[in-house]
Image (spheres, grey):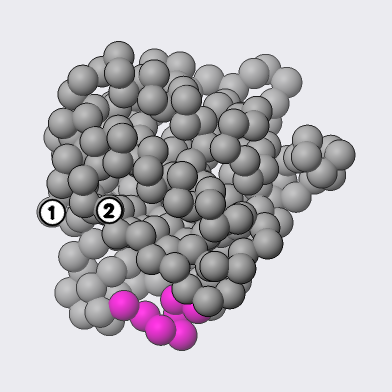
Amino acid sequence: MASQNTTLFSASSKPKLQNSRKLLYERTHVIQPKGEHRATIVWLHGRGDVGASWAEEFQEFPSQNIKWIVPTAPMQAITALGGYQCNAWFDGRPAWEGPDDLEGLDASAAHVVELLSKESPNIKLGVGGFSQGAATSLYITACSMIGSYSDGTIFPCKLHITAVLSGWFPCAKNIETRFLENLEAGEQAKGYSIFLAHGTDDQVVPLNLGEKATFALQFLGFDSITFQTYNG
């Protein structure tokens, strides 16, 4: 795992895509803090959304010390929607043991790493998101602890915090296997802060998926987790 935030990000450190698959990430918005810059968080929107909608919220209520980077997911076909194309971080749906698009998740994780690689070494780095963006953020968090993407390519970024809303834990079985194969990952997870919040009446990502994600993360060794519910 990289010891600095400024690890050189090059094509060789990116996981490979199939030759026929092209993912073009769209506009990225940056919201600067009002005061001293101490942390940078990449925030990922939900499936079918764009970064601009969340960027407007962060611009209206800027943080004192956090810089927000809000990218936009690429357009891609979604199997669960019959091949319909929309902005999405990976080809997947809210499910505990459904088919998972590891390639798409790795590609989005690499995009987030590229955005964070430009930050100074003294800045704390984090990820977060809503719905599918939350799921992607949890996957990225796991890769950071393991130190690699699913294909074994080195994950060159050390994260410090994760905050997600109404998400689930994609590729949970795959992540569990990778943690068992790399005992250092469990040690890295100790003390790492994760905040999860979930709506009690969420009709898109059921509450039980958020609860299962919390239990799965605890099983992996994450011992600094806050899980909260909210109405809606």
Q: How would you rate the neighbour count of disc 2 (Cα within 10 Å): few for under 14, some for 14-19, many for 20 or more?
A: some
For image coordinates 31% across by 35% down, the residue present is: 219
Horizontal relation, residue 167 to residue 67: left or right: right
Mark 2 element type: strand
For disc 1, the marked residue is 122
Residue segment shown in magenta: 57-63
Let me know if residue 62 is in the magenta part. yes
Q: Which of the 4 image quadrants contains residue 222?
A: top left
Residue 34, placed above or below residue 148: below
Q: Which of the 4 image quadrants contains residue 51?
A: bottom right
Residue 194 placed where, x, y %?
30, 53
Mark 1 element type: loop
Q: Distance from label 1 to label 2 (Cα)?
A: 24 Å
Residue 193 visible in image = yes
For image coordinates 54% across by 57% down, the residue present is: 207
Q: Which quarter of the rendered picture does the N terminus lie within?
A: top left
Q: How would you rate the neighbour count of disc 1 (Cα within 10 Å): few for under 14, some for 14-19, many for 20 or more?
A: few
Residue 75 placed where, x, y %?
71, 46
User: Pointer 1 and pointer 2: residues touching (CB < 8 Å)?
Assistant: no
For image coordinates 54% across by 67% down, the residue present is: 200
In this rendered view, identify the residue nearer to me: 16 or 151.
151
Q: Amino acid at mark 2?
A: Ile
In this rendered view, identify the residue nearer to me: 8 or 207.
207
Q: Which mark is residue 225?
A: 2
Q: Which mark is residue 219?
A: none
Q: Amino acid at mark 1?
A: Asn
